[in-house]
Amino acid sequence: MRIALTGGSGFVGSHLLQKLVSEGHEVRVLVRENSDTRLLNRLGVKLVYGDVTNRKSLPNLVNGADIIYHLAANIYTGTPDKFWKVNYYGTRNVLETCLHRDFQRLVFTSTVTVMGSISNPLANESYPYSPTSPYEKSKCEAEKLVLRYHKKFDVPVTVVRPAVVYGPRNMYHLKLYRWIRKGGFLIGSMNNLVHLSYIENLLGGITLAAEKPKAMGEVYIIAYEKPISWRRYVHLVAKAIGVNPRDGQVPLWTVKAVGHLSDFTSWMFGTNPLLTSGWVEDLTKNFAYDISKARRDLGYDPKVTLKEGISRTIGWYRRNGYLR
Ligand SMILES: NC(=O)c1ccc[n+]([C@@H]2O[C@H](COP(=O)([O-])OP(=O)(O)OC[C@H]3O[C@@H](n4cnc5c(N)ncnc54)[C@H](OP(=O)(O)O)[C@@H]3O)[C@@H](O)[C@H]2O)c1
C-alpha cells in the first residue's frame, strides 16, 4: 500500500515507519528542514519536505496515498500558541488537504489526556472531554475537528488515543529511568494510577485502526489492559535495572515548585523542560482506561507485557549508552 505519514521523525512515528517498511509498504514521510532524518534515510523512505503549519507543502505528501497517518504534534515545549498552531491548525491543514481526495483512511493520533484525569476509573471512549493543559486542549479540539470532517465531509477517519507510550528511543521515560537508576526518592505517595502503552503494542492498535472497516469514524483508546500505580511502575523499573528505589518521599510541593520553574525557563528560552508542572500533576492524579472497545472492534491485543516492555526499553537505553 502507499502510505503517507506525518511525525515520522518522532518517537512513535519512527517506530511506525519501521513497521510499515518491514511489511513492504511504500512510505512517504513529511519532514522539516531540521528534522533528524538519519533513520529515515537508512530505511529508504521518500522524504517530503514541508510543515503541517504550511498547507501548501501537504499535497505532495498525501497525493496518491491509500492510508494517511497524522502523528505530527508539538507535545513537550512551547507557548500555548505553538501547541494550537501545530496541533490544531496543523491538523486542520491536513484535513483540508485530504478533502475531495480518494483514499482509504486517515488515522489521527489523539491522546487519552483529552479526557483529563479520571475521577471514576476506568474511563472508556464516551468519558467526557476535560483537557487542562494547552497541549491537551489543542489535541482535544483537533480530535473534535477530525470527527467533524468525517461527519460533515465524509473524510474517512479513525482516531486513536494512546495512553502514555514508552519503549526504545523514548527520551522522556529515559529521564525517569535515570532518576530511578540513581536511587531516586519517591515523590509523594505515588499510589495514583498511570496507564501505559508499550510502543510495539500501540503500533498494532494504530495499524488495525487503519485497516478495519468497523473503525471508520470511531475513537479508540490504546493502552495496556490495566493501569498501574506510579509506585509499582517505579519499583518494576528499579528491579529491572537492579537498584532499590529509596522509599523516603520528596514532598510534593517541592517538586511542584521545580515544575513551575522549569515551565518558565522552557517558555523563556525554548529549551526542553527537565520537568513540567503538567507532568507533576500527572504524578498526583489517576489516569486509567478501559480498552474493551479496541479489543472488540479492532482485535487489539497488547501482547508485550509491562515486564517485557521495561526490559526491552532498558536494554535499548543500555546498548545505546544512555543508561548504565
Ligand atoms: N508519546 C506519548 O506518550 C504519546 C501519548 C499519547 C499521544 N501521543 C501522540 O502521538 C503522536 C506522536 O507522539 P511522539 O511521542 O512520537 O512525539 P515526538 O517524538 O515529539 O514527535 C513529534 C513529531 O512531530 C513532528 N512535528 C512537530 N511539529 C511539526 C510541524 N510543524 N510540521 C511537521 N512535523 C512536525 C516532529 O518533527 P521534527 O522531528 O522535525 O521535530 C516529530 O516527527 C502525537 O500526535 C502525540 O500527540 C503520544
Image (cartoon, helix red, strand yellow):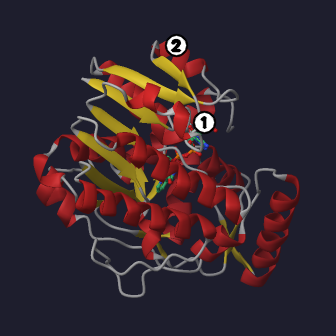
Q: Residues within 10 Å of mark 2 (few under 14, many from 20)?
A: few
Q: Can residue 163 be seen in the rendering of this structure?
A: yes
In percent of width and height, residue 121 lies at 35, 81
- Is 262 situated above or below 28? below
Label 1: how many residues lie within 10 Å, few (<14), some (14-19) or many (20+)? many
Of callouts 2 and 1, which one flags the residue occurring earlier in the amino acid sequence? 2
Q: Quadrant of ligand 1?
A: top right
Residue 122: x %, y % from top left: 31, 78
Residue at x 33% of width, y 28% of height: 3
Residue denoted by label 1: 317
| Residue type pointed to by label 1 | Tyr
Q: Viewer-proximal residue, 209 or 232?
A: 209
Residue for badge 2 = 42
Residue shown at 38%/68% (left/top)?
227
Q: What residue do we see at 59% from left, 40% from top?
A: 54
Q: CA distance from mark 2 to mark 1?
A: 20 Å
In the visual, does 76 lie left or right of 45? right
Tell me the number on the disc at residue 305. none
Residue 84 figure quarter: bottom right
Asked if the residue at tag 1 contacts the one at tag 2, i.e. Cβ–Cβ closer than 8 Å, the answer is: no
Residue type pointed to by label 2: Arg
Q: In the shown orientation, is residue 59 left or right of residue 132?
A: left
